Amino acid sequence: MVKVAIVYHSGKGHTAMQAQSIKNGAESVEGVEVLYWNVEEAADKLDLLDGADAIVFGCPTYMGNVSAGMKAFQEHAVSRWSSRAWQDKIAGAFTTSTNLAGDKENTLMGLLTNAMQLGMIFVSLGIIPAANEPESLHTAAGPSENAVNRTDTSLGAVASAMLCEPEQMAKGDLETAYLYGQRIANITCQFVRGRR
């Protein structure tokens, strides 16, 4: 069984919904087991994370950067840097902020940098902008909330929560997360089993 771990911090529930969509996408791939923990739970399970084939990190973007909860987890897991326990594992990243931009790229870069420091192999989003609404790119309004990768991000999955309740999150953002979870699981399977 290929193991994909999802480690996330969520302040108001939006990033948890995004994490759940990534989990659902990864679980849709045959032969994949998903380990799914918030940062507090994961901090006590570093030995189990050592046995994962992939780890996907996610947190909200607060003031244009990685949330304090995720940063605390990164610092707690610093022993994996010196031991190289996560060397050559697959990695990915996701984030949510209130607004469409919100400087989410800074958060993704922070999560990417941490993965690179740990010697991991990072997986991009791999989805073109507005993949299911290509015609929207020729309009002034641009992609709708149902568009997959509506904000044209490449590093990882992003979501824009606006000031809505978590259950009102944009359908396209959650679908983007689902597809990213699927992509990471498929790539991890290829990496573990080899391409056929």
Image: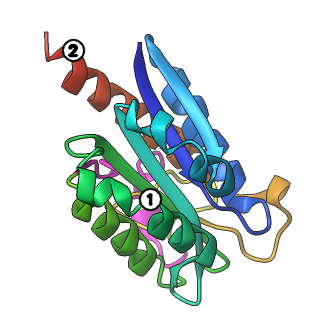
Q: Magenta region's main secondary structure?
A: loop
On the image, the x and y values in percent for residue 195 come to 14, 16
Which region of the structure is painted magenta?
Answer: 120-141
Q: Residue at position x 51%, y 20% from top?
A: 33
At horizontal 58% and vertical 76% (from top left) the residue drawn is 67
Could you tell me the amino acid type at mark 2? Arg
Looking at the image, residue 65 sits to the left or right of residue 144; the answer is left
Q: Report if residue 165 lies within the magenta region.
A: no
Magenta region includes residue 131: yes
Query: Which quadrant is home to the N terminus?
Result: top left
Q: Position of residue 7 (x, y in %)?
A: 55, 49
Identify the residue under disc 1.
Answer: 77
**SS at circle 2:** helix
- For label 2, the crowd category at 10 Å Cα-Cα, with few meaning under 14, some 14 to 19 and many 20 or more, is few
Dot 2 corresponds to which residue? 193
Q: Is residue 172 visible?
A: no
Task: Report the residue at 84% width, 53% height from top.
Answer: 167
Residue 20 horizontal side relative to residue 107, left or right: right
SS of the residue under disc 1: loop
- Could you say which is closer to the camera, residue 2 or residue 15? 2
- Cα distance between the residues tagged 2 and 1: 27 Å
Q: Nearer the viewer, mark 2 or mark 1?
A: 1
- 188 displayed left or right of 22: left
Residue 54 placement (x, y as % from top left): 37, 37
Instruction: Name the residue: 41% across, 48% down.
Output: 131
| Rendered view: 133 above or below 161 | above
Q: Earlier in the sequence, mark 2 or mark 1?
A: 1
